[in-house]
Amino acid sequence: MAEENAGRTSGAVLVVGGGIAGIQSSLDLAESGFKVYLVEDSPAIGGTMAQLDKTFPTNDCAMCVISPKLVGCGRHLNIDLMTNTELVGIKGEAGNFTVTVKKRPRFVDAEKCTGCGACVQHCPVTKVIYPIELEEIELSRADLETVQGILDNHRDRAGKLMPVLQDVDRHYGYLPREVVRFVSRELKVRISDIYSIATFYNSFSLEPRGRHKISVCMGTTCYVKGAEKLMQRICEELETEPGGTTEDLRFTVEAARCIGCCSLAPAIMVNDRVYGRVKLNDIAGILEDYE
């Protein structure tokens, strides 16, 4: 869709997909003098990278990398963002294409939006599509009173979903399915949104966890000093595997990226207690403290 004549650029370029590749391509083309139309099917650009914590292999912060590009793409005078838009058809020949796109309505004036979130709370579509009736939820009276108490503690708090899930996870050791459905109904939040949060943050679990969590530090220093062998010995002692939970729900074993105790490497953490310079022969004694 673009051509260059006598050193001067003309025409326009269509970039399909607003992920990191599409954003970078748009910025490069716009800086070269082309008019760029960036088409993205979802309501916002950023793609998968905007949902990540770290990037491989440098372990850099994903948002630190992509945020300047998001801002630059949104502010560049040569880039028109067309989000919530679908590519319907394309015809023509190289250098002279005609493209048909379908832009879906947002039902919100983007120029007046302040990001207050009121539209989400009062969205009639969400309430119609995702109803959850109380009689469909199987909760014991004790569980019902417990969860209702947690909800009442955060009833008047803005952004109450996250603290409610944290309290539920703290009480049960994980997020029980029926409790999640009850929270979804009471807070008028889609179950899919709750599971998106629960699967994004590793502090939450959808499966029962042990009363004691063993975290084996796998940071560079600990790994070099034998953390992998410590993990193997712990799993042998408890007859489980990394990421697993013992049958008696006493221990959950997991690998930690870093627990910040490099000077004590190799280190493990049981609940909130740190054990430094751990040797293989120390494992049995440490586990006995939590019988």
Image (spheres, helix red, strand yellow):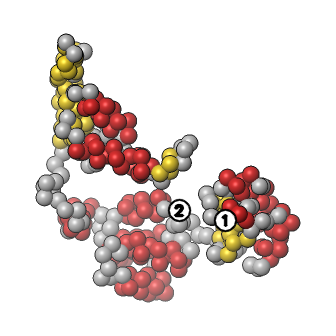
The residue located at (68%, 75%) in the rendering is 273
Identified at 22% across, 40% down, the residue is 76
Q: Give the secondary structure at mark 2.
A: loop
- Residue 254 versus residue 62 in the image, above or below: below
Few, some or many residues within 10 Å of mark 2 (<14, 14–19, 20+): few
| In this rendering, position of residue 240 left or right of residue 20 | right
Three-letter amino acid code at the position of disc 1: Cys
- Spot occupied by residue 266 in the image (x, y as percentages of width and height): 74, 61
Q: Position of residue 135 (x, y in %)?
A: 37, 77
| Above or below, 234 relative to 182 | above
Residue type at mark 2? Asn
Left or right: residue 20 versus residue 198 is left
Residue marked by disc 2: 202
**Furthest residue in direction right, as rendered:** 281
Disc number at residue 261? 1
Figure quadrant of the N terminus? top left
- Front in this rendered view, residue 210 or 65: 65
Q: Residue 214: x, y in percent?
A: 68, 68
Near-viewer residue (280 or 6): 6
Relative vertical location of residue 96 with respect to residue 87 in this rendering, above or below: above
Which mark sits nearer the N-terminus, 1 or 2? 2
Where residue 111 appears, x then y in whole percent?
Answer: 13, 54
Q: Nearer the viewer, mark 1 or mark 2?
A: 1
**The C terminus sits in image quarter:** bottom right
Alpha-carbon distance for marks 1 and 2?
Answer: 20 Å
